[in-house]
Structure formats: structure tokens, C-alpha cells
Amino acid sequence: RFVLKGATFVCDTCDSLTKPTIDDYVFSGFFPASLSETVTYLFSEEALLLCHHISHKCPGSSKNMYAHTLEEVSKEYGRTGPINIPLFTTAEREWETCRHYIDQEVFKRNKID
């Protein structure tokens, strides 16, 4: 989880500075807590993917408990601050919806068959 106060992307080729968009964050492996214009809270796509697999492979597991566990692991690695559980669950739902849309519309995969 990352809390943004201000961010700028720097081009590796020409060193130009640009203000990042939601697309830039998503293509960099992060997903916003909400798909609004103002991005202030990001989650690693790896954390969302792990939550997806745990909730599908371990029926009955709570996304709230996953978020609390993620918070504890983050503390052990020196990060501070709680994970905002409502924002996490919103991000996870929106990420799953986007992932489903990409599978269905972009890759034309039907996971039901």
C-alpha cells in the first residue's frame, strides 16, 4: 500500500517530467483504491492477486482478515500506518472487475467453460 502526497514520473530516455495518470500507475503494477481522477492511495497488484487467490482457494476466508494480515506483514517490514480496509476492499473489487473485463473483452477468454 502506498499513500501518495505527490508524484512525478521521469522518462528514462529524455529525463522529461510528467504527472502520472491512473493508466501509468496500473501499467507500473499498482491499482488505485478508487477509479477517481485523484489518486491518493495505491495497492500493489501482487497484493490484490494474492487476495484473489486466497479468497477463491480458501472459501470462508475473510478479505478483512487478509487486509489485517497484510498490515501486520507490512509492519514487520518497517512500514507504518494501518491499511484502510474499506479502500482495500473497494480496490480489490474494482481490480477483479477490470481483470474480468480484460479476460472477456481483450483476451476473449471464457473461464466458465
Image (tube, rainbow, N blue to C red):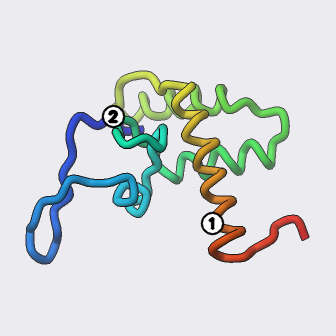
Q: Quadrant of the C terminus?
A: bottom right
Residue at figure coordinates x 63%, y 59% from the top left: 99
Q: Is residue 59 above or below residue 20?
A: above
| Number of numbered discs visible in the structure rendering | 2
Q: Which residue is mark 1?
A: 102
Q: Residues within 10 Å of mark 1 (few under 14, many from 20)?
A: few
Secondary structure state at the residue bearing disc 2? strand
Left or right for 58, reference 46? right
Q: Is residue 30 above or below residue 105?
A: above
Secondary structure state at the residue bearing disc 1? helix
Q: Quadrant of the N terminus?
A: top left
As drawn, the residue found furthest toward the left would be: 15
Rendered image: mark on residue 34? none
Left or right for 101, reference 23? right
Q: Position of residue 95 (x, y in %)?
A: 58, 49
Q: Are marks 2 and 1 in contact (CB under 8 Å)?
A: no
Q: Which residue is mark 2?
A: 3
As drawn, the residue found furthest toward the front would be: 37
Of the residues under marks 2 and 1, which one precedes in the sequence? Answer: 2
Left or right for 100, reference 23? right
